[in-house]
Image (cartoon, helix red, strand yellow):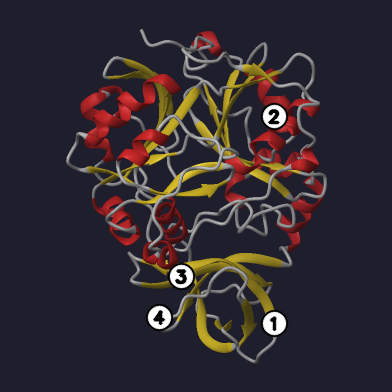
């Protein structure tokens, strides 16, 4: 039998219990902007040694050995691209399978007496329906501040093991994980423990061939549906696998001991369909999929309703509230938000990047672009941003101020590329 997914056995360091005073919430590190695909692809600088201040994931040596161009991202030395370039990596994920190192993300466990106890404790901090989460299921939600602003977005998974009825696994963003842990620890009651899982690594396999590739090494993963998970083995290596990812493609995320992740990665890379993928393609893939990047498309100035994340708030939570900022969220659900995140398709080939001013057809400023660049699958520029109420309908004409020139664009429905999750 595979070990429970909250194993505290480790070949390196033991999981750490988070103390509330470890990091003050207001000291959250700023999010580093991911490189734009064009500039990263055209950069001719040779890979540099990582500064001592940058952390390294357990797969760092593998990236260097495979010729990755490394960059500083969220306090880590991370691969932005490999020899083939970002567009080739992006296309490979859309057509075959890409392997992503996401070990910089924060993994942690909430542990309580039983599921309802730990779920209600988390529901006091997020708007998602955690009590209703079934064993072996996963849910996307957000940590909110008292005004309903988004402190971070995260994934929550309930263990599929009956012996771990009071265990939830959390995956949070790399740049905010220290502040997230402190925020959680300071607000959890004494009967709920937050345990950091720094002894674990995390990788993602994404693309239409992901199920074939992973299934050859882990047959248990094949019948999983989107947003479901289980503890299992990959070629005899204990791991926790979820049918999830952040590219819009079908695929998996695999959590395992840091000391075993290289073995799993090497076996995946022995498959002809699998290639390593860097941050550059990860960003263009998630943008085409219409997925938010924390610190850009969502932050403490945006609510889940403004961010078009209403689908992540269950009916019971919408009606009952009981989470930070519930009054604002319920008001915006009823009356409509003052602004909304939308998809934007510029005409022509010039991309509208983050910070681009959005104007109405008659020249009035109505918003700002939060993410933008070239979409290789779309074969043209794509952007997301916030616009005022009344300008959100698909087909609404806009003007984007790019290099001081107004360029025509229009509102389009998200995502730019259809999701291919294994839902059915």
Give me the residue at 64% from left, 83% from top: 359
Calculate the distance from the C-alpha at mark 2 to the C-alpha at mark 3: 35 Å
Closer to the camera, 5 or 36? 36
Closer to the camera, 338 or 154? 154
Q: Which mark is residue 365?
A: 1
Q: Which quadrant of the figure has residue 151?
A: top right
Would residue 376 appear left or right of 72 to someone viewing this image?
Answer: left
Whichever of labels 2 and 4 marks the residue nearer the N terminus, that label is 2
Name the spot of residue 260 as percent of width and height, x first.
Answer: 37, 20
Calculate the distance from the C-alpha at mark 4 to the C-alpha at mark 1: 22 Å
Calculate the distance from the C-alpha at mark 2 to the C-alpha at mark 4: 45 Å
Task: Give the answer, above or below, for where 418 lies relative to 4.
Answer: below
Name the spot of residue 236 as percent of width and height, x first.
Answer: 29, 14
Q: Which mark is residue 224?
A: none
Q: Which mark is residue 349?
A: 4
Q: Is residue 251 visible?
A: no
Would residue 283 appear left or right of 389 to someone viewing this image?
Answer: left
Circle 2 residue: 122
Q: Residues within 10 Å of mark 4 (few under 14, many from 20)?
A: few
Would residue 294 appear left or right of 186 to someone viewing this image?
Answer: left
Whichever of labels 2 and 3 marks the residue nearer the N terminus, that label is 2
Task: Give the answer, above or below, for where 62 lies relative to 115.
Answer: below
- Determine whether the residue tagged by mark 1 lies in a helix, strand or loop: strand
Whichever of labels 1 and 3 marks the residue nearer the N terminus, that label is 1
Calculate the distance from the C-alpha at mark 1 to the C-alpha at mark 3: 19 Å
Q: Is residue 321 visible?
A: yes
Instruction: Please name which of the two marks, 4 or 1, marks the residue nearer to the observer.
Output: 4
Instruction: Please name which of the two marks, 2 or 3, marks the residue nearer to the observer.
Output: 3
Circle 3 residue: 382
């Amino acid at each position: 039998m595979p070990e429970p997914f909250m194993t505290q056995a480790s070949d390196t360091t033991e999981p750490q219990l988070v103390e509330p005073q470890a990091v003050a919430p207001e000291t959250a590190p700023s999010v580093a902007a991911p490189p734009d695909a064009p500039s990263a692809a055209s950069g001719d600088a040779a890979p540099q040694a990582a500064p001592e201040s940058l952390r390294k994931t357990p797969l760092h040596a593998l990236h260097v050995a495979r010729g990755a161009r490394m960059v500083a991202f969220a306090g880590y030395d991370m691969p932005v691209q490999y020899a083939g370039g970002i567009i080739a990596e992006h296309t490979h994920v859309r057509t075959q399978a890409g392997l992503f190192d996401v070990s910089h993300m924060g993994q942690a466990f909430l542990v309580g007496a039983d599921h309802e106890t730990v779920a209600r404790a988390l529901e006091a901090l997020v708007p998602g329906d955690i009590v209703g989460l079934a064993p072996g299921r996963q849910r996307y939600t957000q940590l909110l501040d008292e005004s309903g602003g988004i402190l971070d977005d995260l994934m929550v998974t309930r263990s599929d093991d009956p012996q771990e009825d009071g265990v939830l696994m959390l995956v949070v963003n790399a740049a905010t994980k220290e502040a997230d842990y402190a925020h959680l620890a300071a607000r959890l009651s004494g009967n709920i423990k937050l345990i950091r899982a720094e002894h674990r690594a995390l990788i993602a396999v994404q693309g239409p061939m992901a199920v074939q590739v992973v299934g050859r090494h882990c047959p248990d993963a094949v019948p999983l549906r989107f947003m479901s998970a289980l503890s299992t083995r990959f070629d005899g290596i204990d791991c926790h696998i979820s049918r999830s990812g952040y590219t819009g493609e079908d695929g998996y995320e695999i959590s395992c001991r840091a000391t075993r992740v290289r073995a799993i990665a090497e076996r995946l890379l022995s498959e002809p369909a699998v290639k390593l993928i860097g941050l550059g393609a990860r960003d263009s893939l998630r943008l085409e999929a219409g997925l938010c990047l924390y610190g850009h498309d969502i932050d403490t100035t945006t609510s889940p309703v403004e961010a078009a994340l209403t689908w992540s708030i269950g009916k019971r939570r919408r009606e009952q509230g009981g989470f930070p900022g519930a009054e604002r969220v319920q008001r915006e659900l009823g009356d409509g938000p003052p602004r909304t995140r939308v998809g934007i398709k510029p005409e022509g080939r010039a991309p509208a990047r983050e910070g681009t001013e959005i104007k109405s057809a008659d020249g009035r400023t109505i918003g700002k672009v939060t993410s933008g660049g070239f979409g290789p699958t779309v074969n043209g520029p794509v952007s997301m941003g916030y616009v005022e109420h009344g300008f959100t309908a698909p087909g609404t004409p806009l003007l984007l101020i790019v290099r001081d020139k107004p360029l025509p664009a229009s509102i389009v429905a998200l995502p730019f590329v259809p999701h291919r999750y294994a839902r059915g």
